[in-house]
Image (spheres, rainbow, N blue to C red):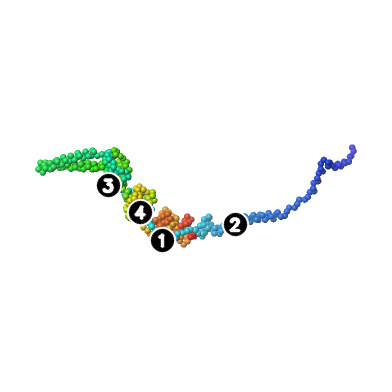
Amino acid sequence: MSLETPTAASPKTWDTTTSAPPVAAPPATPASPPKRGRGWLGWLLAAVIIGGMAWAKMKYFPSPTAGEKGGGKGGASGGKGGLGGAGAKVPVQVYVVAATKLSDEVTSTGSVIADESVTIQSEISGKITSLNIQEGQPVRKGQLLFTINAADVQAQLQKQEYNIKLYRDQEQRQRTLLAKEYISRQEYEQSQNALLTAQADLAALRVTLQKAYVRAPFDGILGLRNTSVGAYVSPGTAITTLSRVKPVKIDFNVPSRFAQSVRVGDPVLVTDEATTKKIEAKVYAINPQIDPVSRTLPVRAIYSNKNMELRPGGFVKVNLELGETADALQIPTEAVVPIASGYTVFVVRKGKAAVQTVNIGVRSDKLIQITKGLAVGDSVIRTGILQVKEGDRVAVQK
């Protein structure tokens, strides 16, 4: 075994005619140290952000003041002090009571009725033989309207007249015999009674015959007729109507509290609902009793109606003037608080709200008359009534 000395491999050679020789890698350089400026820039940016948040909080979300913190258990309402904490005042507006002139006026609704009105009917049964009804035309009292066939009544009437002639002759003969004492008084009285009875029957037949001729009971205007000539009618059958519309009456009611103020002759301003025309009527009758259901007093006014401004059955508005009060106390409608037992208001006394019971009178859409409970110079709260309570301190605003 022979020992051979290894020989070093010869270095590779590149054929520069076929490929380029490899480029040697640059020598490795140590990593560059970090820049020291980045640290303080980050801290500066964080400080700016925190400062902006603090400014926004102070600007849009301020801390509660000492007065607001003092609300204690009152929470959002500020406890005993109301809005804004203890000692805060409720802002209100007031109305200072003063004496004013007031026209006592009652507004109501009414109905127009005819001065006289009847339904024309027949009192006996029979066939209509003549009809003298011109619909919608005026008639005079006693004018014949229609007739009923009464031939049978006339025949009975003629028969009874013959009987009466006979009974009268018999009575005269019996009287002569009684004077000579040939008959008793009883026989004479029987003949006399027969004559008187026949005369009574004749009077009844004449009344029945008069019922066959129906006449107008008063001056008026006829309505529409409901039958024709030849129709058979019975008692209670409506033939037509008759109304007197000059003058007309207006029925309306007033509240019972004004019952003592209404007088006969008081002027009444009536407004027709259909034409809005205003006319003046006068009270001419007052019901002596108050309606126990509606607690109102029925009143009736009268109007001449010469030009037929109102028609019976129409609806009207009524304003009744009851006089004028020179020193009436009135307050705004919104200041009055209705309760179960009546009405109350809030008045300002020594800077605090106090409840005062009042009685009311005439009222309109804006003002209410106070008849009891207030005096001239009282300050009545008219706004903020829902927020105010008895004893609350108030701040009066102009």
Query: Which is closer to the viewer, label 1 or label 3?
Result: 3
| Horizontal relation, residue 265 to residue 61: left or right | left
Q: Quadrant of residue 21?
A: top right
Which residue extends farthest top? 1
Task: Report, in whole angstroms, how far the alpha carbon at label 1 lies from the one at label 3.
Answer: 57 Å
Instruction: Please say if the residues under marks 1 and 3 sit with CB atoms less than 8 Å apart.
Output: no
**Residue 342 point in image, percent of width and height:** 41, 55
Between 162 and 38, the residue placed more toward the observer is 162
Q: How far apart are the alpha carbons under marks 4 and 3?
A: 29 Å
The image position of residue 91, as x and y in percent, is 49, 58
Q: Nearer the viewer, mark 3 or mark 2?
A: 3
Q: Secondary structure at mark 3?
A: loop
Q: Which mark is residue 99?
A: 1
Residue type at numbered disc 3: Lys
Q: Which residue is mark 4?
A: 280
Looking at the rendered structure, the kind of residue marked 2 is: Met
The answer to whether mark 1 and mark 2 are in CB contact below 8 A is no
Mark closer to the chain start, 1 or 3: 1
- The residue closer to the viewer here, 13 or 314, is 314
- Which residue lies under the disc numbered 2? 58
Amino acid type shown at disc 4:
Glu
Mark 4 or mark 3: which comes first in sequence?
A: 3
236 to the left or right of 203? right
Mark number displayed over residue 141:
3
Q: Nearer the viewer, mark 1 or mark 2?
A: 1
- Name which of mark 1 and mark 4 comes first in the sequence: 1
Q: Is residue 173 above or below residue 97?
A: above
Asked if labels 4 and 1 touch by Cβ distance under 8 angstroms, the answer is no
